[in-house]
Image: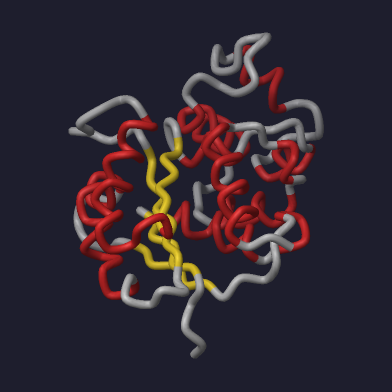
Amino acid sequence: MDRPELVVLVADLDIEQAVKGLFARSPALKVRPIRHQIVRDTMAGHDGGTFKRADAVLKSFSADPTCRALVLFDRAWDGAPSNDAKRLAADVEQRLAPMWGDRARCVVLDPEIEVWVFSDSPHVDRALGFSEGQLRPWLRDQGQWPDGQPKPGDPKTAVRQALRKSGIKPSAALFHELASKVGLERCTDPSFRSFVETLRTWFPA
């Protein structure tokens, strides 16, 4: 196997599947094909564990000066030292810096990976089991997606309620499906834009 030029540390299977779906779409990302390796933190703690262990988990990759690192985890987890996604990311990057220099970045999904689900793409409605144009009105009626807001206030609860209504079992495959189909410019979430812009800076088409 060729050495990766990018290692992506993810906190859970949902994020892993989203990243896999995105990396299969280099032209849509507007990057060149990237030799990458996704590492899922399987130890206890998921998001909190990834926050605490990122530097240790990625240490073995740092000796290769041609490799870069990207860390992804949710902001919302029990015991988080801050509710500020930028502060959490800066903490991780500070601990990575002695080994990685400017070759490592952390993107914190605020509040959770489900925030990447919601856009105006019809693929979102269909993936959650709704007819085109019916998801947002239904979530509005449930008090989950107020008028004038770009996304539900609690995206995880919104996804779970929509899937329950549709009779669809929650699965990480949902994130892979959406990442593989939704137009990337439709997602305006700041953490998603940061993820995309980081890749475009490091690996321009």
Label total for image: 0
Instruction: Give the side of residue 39 with respect to residue 136, left or right.
Output: left
Q: Is residue 88 above or below residue 45?
A: above
Front-lying residue, 69 or 133: 69
Q: Is residue 25 visible?
A: no
Q: Quadrant of residue 143?
A: top right
**Residue 72 in the image, given as x and y percentages of width and height:** 42, 50
**Residue 89 in the image, given as x and y percentages of width and height:** 35, 40
Q: Is residue 93 above or below residue 81?
A: below
**Residue 115 in the image, given as x and y percentages of width and height:** 53, 34
**Residue 8 in the image, given as x and y percentages of width and height:** 44, 62
Instruction: Give the side of residue 193 with respect to residue 87, left or right.
Output: right
Q: Quadrant of residue 76?
A: top left
Q: Which residue corresponds to the image point at 61% horizontal and 46% vertical from the top-left?
A: 197
Q: Quadrant of the C terminus?
A: bottom right
The single residue placed furthest to the bottom in the displayed view is: 1
Q: Is residue 107 above or below residue 43?
A: above
Q: Is residue 153 visible?
A: yes
Q: Which residue corresponds to the image point at 42% horizontal and 51% vertical from the top-left?
A: 105
